[in-house]
Image (cartoon, grey):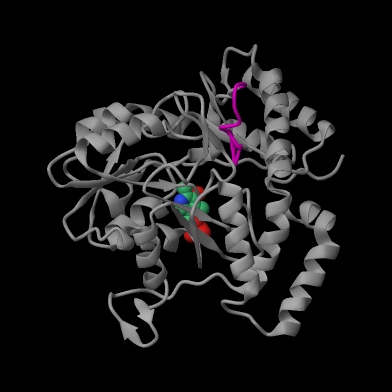
């Protein structure tokens, strides 16, 4: 059996090596390293793929979130509501901009932001909601957009883990995640579903004015050369990453299918086990792109399970072991432990199994057997 990896970037690269190597060399030959034609071509291709009017590439997914908030003109003291159970980048940029992060609990069934909890957290100072499509599963965007309309709030979708996911609206139509809110962001970090070979990110919007504003923000606040109208940042995607992303974007659906395929095999094997709760798989649509395949285990010592799997040569992850509201940097007197019941439980019970595009049946079976054996011993 091939060695099991949490993410197999090498195996994936080998299948596209000839094309990627040639294109990277072409970029070097061209010396158009920054803002070259590859970046513009990638931007257009991603706009088509997502069916969104504007894609603005930037340096990474954390910058993308920060720039989105700057573009919306959020100001010190504004409250921004986001999920307690996510990667720290989401809350970090809120705090960094002098905005007030308001963390709320998530749902037990999809691990995404709980819309009722958002509703209860809204105050006259609330300006935005940041849903995260955690682990690649679309959050309940219809309900979030409705709530945002009622209270006149912006919605910023953190789509770092969800690129390619199709959200199905209650009327049956579909939209790509990241294109439903006022603005969406993503990361091209190597292990993300659409990852480059370094750092990268992007911002999406259908709003022409916001796109214009953001294009200036990413470029030192310049709308005309050497005229700095707003305080901006320097955040760019470089041409080598863009050319790699162009190749990988053509395979993104196939990559997400491979992830879903592995997820179905895991779920089929675990479904009958009372102690293992499998992630939601919707058969009507493809709203889950399985950035992570995350189980919760009941009546089981999760940390001992991690250790057991590691000993058998199976890497696994605990995303995330500590709720954000209990992180030193983000503690706030307004938080009450009773308001984070789901997150507090998830951090103890969740475990993410190897998930990538190159998993074979032998590896999947080996992982399944190891989990079932431990949980039932
Ligand atoms: C990866 C990630 C980010 C940050 O992306 P970087 O490119 O690493 O800055 C933000 N939010 C979520 C949910 C992520 O998973």
216 to the left or right of 314: left
Q: Nearer the viewer, residue 157 or 102?
A: 157
**Residue at the location (70% across, 64% down)?**
244
Where residue 151 sits: x, y (%)?
20, 38
Where residue 78 sits: x, y (%)?
19, 53
Where residue 201 sits: x, y (%)?
52, 61
The image shows residue 155, relative to residue 47, as above or below, that is above
The image shows residue 75, relative to residue 103, as above or below, that is below
Q: Nearer the viewer, residue 329 or 14?
A: 14
**Residue at the location (33% across, 27% down)?**
341
Magenta stretch: give its range: 283-293
Residue 167 among magenta residues:
no
In the rendered view of the protein, which quadrant contains the C terminus? top right
**Residue at the location (51% across, 29% down)?**
173
**Residue at the location (77% across, 77% down)?**
26
The image shows residue 71, relative to residue 254, as above or below, that is below
Q: Main secondary structure of the magenta part?
A: loop
Residue 4 visible to the viewer: yes
Residue 105 visible to the viewer: no
| Outermost bottom residue | 226
365 to the left or right of 221: right
The part of the image, by quadrant, that contains residue 355 is: top right
Where residue 264 sits: x, y (%)?
69, 25
Q: How many marks?
A: 0
In the rendered view of the protein, which quadrant contains the N terminus? top right
The part of the image, by quadrant, that contains residue 66 is: bottom left
227 to the left or right of 166: left
The image shows residue 9, relative to residue 243, as above or below, that is above
Q: Nearer the viewer, residue 3 or 105?
A: 105
The part of the image, by quadrant, that contains residue 89 is: bottom left
């Amino acid at each position: 059996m091939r060695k099991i990896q949490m993410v197999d970037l090498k195996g994936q690269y080998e299948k596209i090596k000839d094309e990627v190597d040639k294109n990277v060399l072409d970029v070097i030959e061209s010396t158009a390293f920054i803002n070259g034609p590859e970046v513009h071509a990638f931007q257009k291709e991603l706009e088509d793929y997502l069916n969104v009017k504007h894609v603005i590439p930037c340096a990474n997914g954390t910058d993308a979130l920060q720039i989105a908030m700057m573009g919306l003109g959020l100001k010190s003291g504004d409250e921004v509501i986001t999920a307690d159970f996510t990667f720290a980048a989401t809350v970090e940029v809120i705090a960094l901009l002098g905005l007030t992060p308001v963390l709320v609990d998530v749902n037990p069934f999809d691990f995404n932001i709980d819309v009722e909890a958002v509703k209860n957290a809204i105050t006259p100072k609330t300006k935005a909601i940041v849903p995260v499509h955690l682990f690649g599963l679309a959050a309940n965007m219809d309900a979030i957009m409705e709530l945002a309309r009622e209270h006149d709030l912006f919605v910023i979708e953190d789509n770092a883990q969800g690129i390619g996911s199709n959200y199905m609206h209650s009327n049956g139509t579909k939209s790509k995640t990241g294109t439903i809110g006022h603005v969406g962001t993503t990361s091209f970090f190597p292990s993300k579903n659409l990852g480059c070979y370094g750092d990268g990110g992007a911002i999406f919007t259908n709003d022409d004015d916001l796109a214009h504003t953001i294009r200036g923000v990413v470029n030192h606040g310049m709308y005309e050369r050497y005229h700095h109208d707003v305080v901006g940042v320097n955040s760019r995607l470089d041409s080598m990453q863009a050319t790699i992303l162009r190749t990988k974007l053509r395979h993104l659906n196939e990559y997400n299918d491979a992830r879903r395929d592995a997820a179905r095999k895991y779920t089929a094997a675990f479904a009958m086990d009372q102690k293992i709760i499998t992630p939601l798989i919707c058969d009507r649509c493809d709203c889950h792109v399985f950035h992570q395949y995350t189980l919760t285990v009941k009546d089981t010592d999760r940390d001992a399970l991690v250790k057991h799997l590691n000993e058998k040569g199976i890497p696994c992850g605990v995303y995330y072991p500590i709720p954000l509201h209990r992180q030193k940097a983000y503690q706030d007197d307004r938080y009450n432990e009773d308001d984070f019941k789901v997150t507090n439980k998830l951090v103890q019970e969740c475990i993410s199994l190897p998930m990538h595009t190159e998993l074979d049946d032998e590896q999947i079976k080996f992982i399944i057997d190891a989990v079932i054996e431990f949980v039932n011993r």
